[in-house]
Image (tube, grey):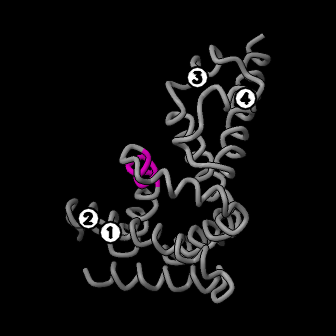
């Protein structure tokens, strides 16, 4: 019986996730209602509220799922002898690959970044990877917590700004070139410790 419950929950989360992604590819989050999400997912509102407090809670779940998907793909690309720089590079490259495929979703999410709640939650997820890279490449014991926080937030802002810029200039620069440049930028920033 527990197995069936797990499968139902998985199916519910999948339906809600896909519904929100589909809606976000058409319009910004502030124009999407819980009713629309439920209709698209063929889920009752009571079921939605059983799992999520509101559409922002679902958005955070979707953002974490996307991050996990990117991390998993990056992990598959790594070799055991890769260093911290190469690990970070694969994460950035996979992020740009995802962005290339899901451009409309990102554009809609970008318009939702004006919500401080959404921006803070998404940037906190990304900050974990940036801080891990900084700690591995520069020696975490040399970095003050304030430096780690401030630098990671600065780099995250630059990363998101660069992603948005690239969407309008994809014909000029490949995702590989963008990943190379962003990793170079981060490496130089971290190297200034």
Which of labels 2 and 3 is toward the front?
3
Q: Against 68, is 191 above or below?
A: below
Q: Quadrant of residue 143?
A: bottom left
Q: Residues within 10 Å of mark 2 (few under 14, many from 20)?
A: few
Distance Cα–Cα, label 1 vs label 3: 33 Å
Q: Secondary structure at mark 1?
A: helix
Which of labels 4 and 3 is toward the front?
3
Q: Residue at x 72, y 29 (%)?
A: 10
Image disc number at residue 10: 4
Asked if the stretch drawn in magenta spans residue 167, the answer is no
Q: Nearer the viewer, residue 152 or 76?
A: 152
Image disc number at residue 150: 2
Tell me if label 2 and label 1 are in contact, CB under 8 Å: yes
Q: Earlier in the sequence, mark 4 or mark 1?
A: 4
Q: Residues within 10 Å of mark 1 (few under 14, many from 20)?
A: few
Is 15 placed left or right of 156 in the picture? Answer: right
Where is mark 1, residue-wise?
154
Q: Position of residue 122 (x, y in %)?
A: 46, 51
Q: Magenta part of the protein: which range?
A: 118-125
Q: Earlier in the sequence, mark 4 or mark 3?
A: 4
* Quarter of the image where the N terminus is located: top right
């Amino acid at each position: 019986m527990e197995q069936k419950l797990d499968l139902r929950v998985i199916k519910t989360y999948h339906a809600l996730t896909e519904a929100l992604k589909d809606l976000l590819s058409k319009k910004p989050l502030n124009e999407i209602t819980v009713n629309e999400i439920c209709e698209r997912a063929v889920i009752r509102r009571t079921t939605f509220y059983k799992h999520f407090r509101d559409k922002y809670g679902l958005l955070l779940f979707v953002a974490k799922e996307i991050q996990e998907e990117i991390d998993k793909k990056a992990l598959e690309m790594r070799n055991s002898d890769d260093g911290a720089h190469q690990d970070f590079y694969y994460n950035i490259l996979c992020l740009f690959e995802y962005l290339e495929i899901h451009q409309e979703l990102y554009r809609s999410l970008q318009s939702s970044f004006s919500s401080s709640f959404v921006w803070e939650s998404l940037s906190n997820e990304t900050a974990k990877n940036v801080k891990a890279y900084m700690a591995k490449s520069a020696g975490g014991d040399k970095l003050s917590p304030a430096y780690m926080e401030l630098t990671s937030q600065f780099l995250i802002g630059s990363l998101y700004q660069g992603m948005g810029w690239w969407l309008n200039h994809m014909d000029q620069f490949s995702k590989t070139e963008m990943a190379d440049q962003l990793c170079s930028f981060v490496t130089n920033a971290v190297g200034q410790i």
